[in-house]
């Protein structure tokens, strides 16, 4: 695991640079057949990469399954896929 640490007092330029590095790491991992996430799942931080990794149709299938299993969206709302 790579951990890019940010402190609330860090300068905006530093935070922006870390975000760029994070984006490059994920892009590279997906590009070589890896994944955008680890054993802890997607959560909210990696949702935007899910479609890039699996494709629009797969993510829509995930949404369909989520809606069918959790119609009230009470199980981890706002995580993995937005419904």
Image (cartoon, grey):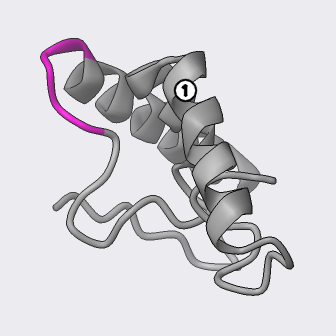
Residue 41 lies in the magenta stretch: no
User: In the image, is residue 2 above or below residue 43?
Assistant: above
Q: Residue furthest top?
A: 31
Q: Is residue 7 left or right of residue 74?
A: left
Seen in the image, is 29 located left or right of residue 7?
A: left
Q: Residue 39 at x, y = what percent? A: 21, 67
- Tell me what residue is drawn at x 65 percent, y 42 percent: 16
| Vertical comparison of 26 with 28: above or below | below
Main secondary structure along the magenta-highlighted residues: loop
Numbered disc 1: secondary structure = helix
- Residue 27: quadrant of the picture: top left
The correct choice, above or below, for 37 with respect to 72 in the image is above
The image quadrant of residue 8 is bottom right
- Residue drawn where x is 14% and y is 20% of the image: 33
View extreme (bottom): residue? 74
Q: Could you say where residue 31 lies in the image, as x and y percent from the top left?
A: 24, 13
Q: How many marks?
A: 1
Q: Which of these two is toward me, 58 or 23?
A: 58
**Image coords of residue 52 (percent x, y):** 49, 20
Task: Classify residue 83 as left or right of residue 16.
Answer: right
For label 1, the residue is: 51
Q: Which residue is more in the foreground, 8 or 11? A: 8
Q: Is residue 71 above or below residue 55?
A: below
Crowd tier of the residue under label 1, counting other residues whose Cα lies within 10 Å: few below 14, some 14–19, many 20 or above: some
Instruction: Name the residue located 62 percent from the left edge and 63 percent from the top edge.
Output: 44
Q: Is residue 2 rendered to the left or right of residue 65? A: left
* Residue span colored magenta: 31-35
Residue drawn at x 76%, y 52% is: 82
Q: Is residue 33 magenta?
A: yes
Q: Outermost residue, front direction?
A: 68
């Amino acid at each position: 695991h790579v951990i890019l640490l940010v402190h609330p007092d860090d300068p905006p330029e530093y935070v922006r640079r870390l975000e760029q590095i994070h984006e490059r790491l994920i892009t590279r991992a997906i590009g070589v057949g890896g994944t955008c996430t680890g054993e802890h799942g997607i959560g909210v931080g990696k949702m935007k990469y899910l479609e890039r990794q699996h494709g629009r149709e797969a993510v829509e299938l995930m949404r369909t399954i989520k809606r069918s299993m959790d119609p009230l969206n009470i199980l981890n709302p706002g995580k993995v896929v937005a419904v």
